[in-house]
Amino acid sequence: MKSDIQRVTHLGICVSDLERSLRFYGEVFHCVEVGRFEGKGDPSATILGLPASLELTAVYLERDGWRIELLHYPTPGHRGPAAPRPMNQLGYTHLSFRVSDLEAVLARIEACGGRVLRETYQGTLGSKVVFAVDPDGVRFELIEAPGDPNAIPGQPRPPQ
């Protein structure tokens, strides 16, 4: 089937402190900066539905062929609490990463200003899963499990 959708380009994340977020995503998830965009006023303000006084810096980070766009708004600033959204709130809930050393990743998260939601930790059948948040409260699921890192969680493993 031919599709008119060419590819997924990025996931945007609004951040309160661009340098802190660049450090966090670079050091924790080994994302690499691949581009920047500076926007002032229109057409960016119109596209984003923000005031004409808009000032924006967007930084594109890449990992495993996909991109995160960090959006920093000196004007009009950011809105909302730096807290994890409830998992049952409509819209974006989390990003998920497969990891080979959960404890090492959790230590990097805390060293870079994030927080591990230790109350979410589950460890069963050789797998470990926990949620954590970046400095602005964006939620991540971290999964350490044997087998294929591309496997869908909870699906039966193919016979060996």
Image (cartoon, helix red, strand yellow):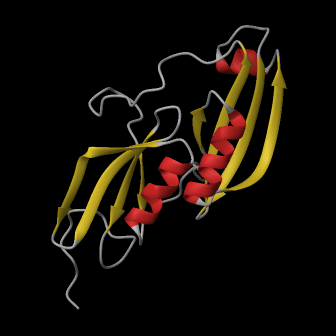
Tell whether 98 sits left or right of 63. Answer: left
Tell whether 145 sits left or right of 52. Answer: left
Camera sees residue 9 = no
Residue 45 in the image: above or below residue 125: above
Camera sees residue 111 = yes
Residue 88 in the image: above or below residue 104: above
Front-most of residues 120 and 112: 112
| Residue 83 drawn at (x, y percent) | 42, 27
Looking at the rendering, in which quadrant would you find the C terminus? bottom left
| Residue 101 drawn at (x, y percent) | 41, 70
Residue at figure coordinates x 72%, y 39% from the top left: 19
Residue at figure coordinates x 67%, y 32% from the top left: 71
Residue 68 in the image: above or below residue 40: below
Front-most of residues 94 and 125: 125
Residue at figure coordinates x 66%, y 39% from the top left: 20
| Residue 93 drawn at (x, y percent) | 38, 37
Front-most of residues 14 and 50: 14
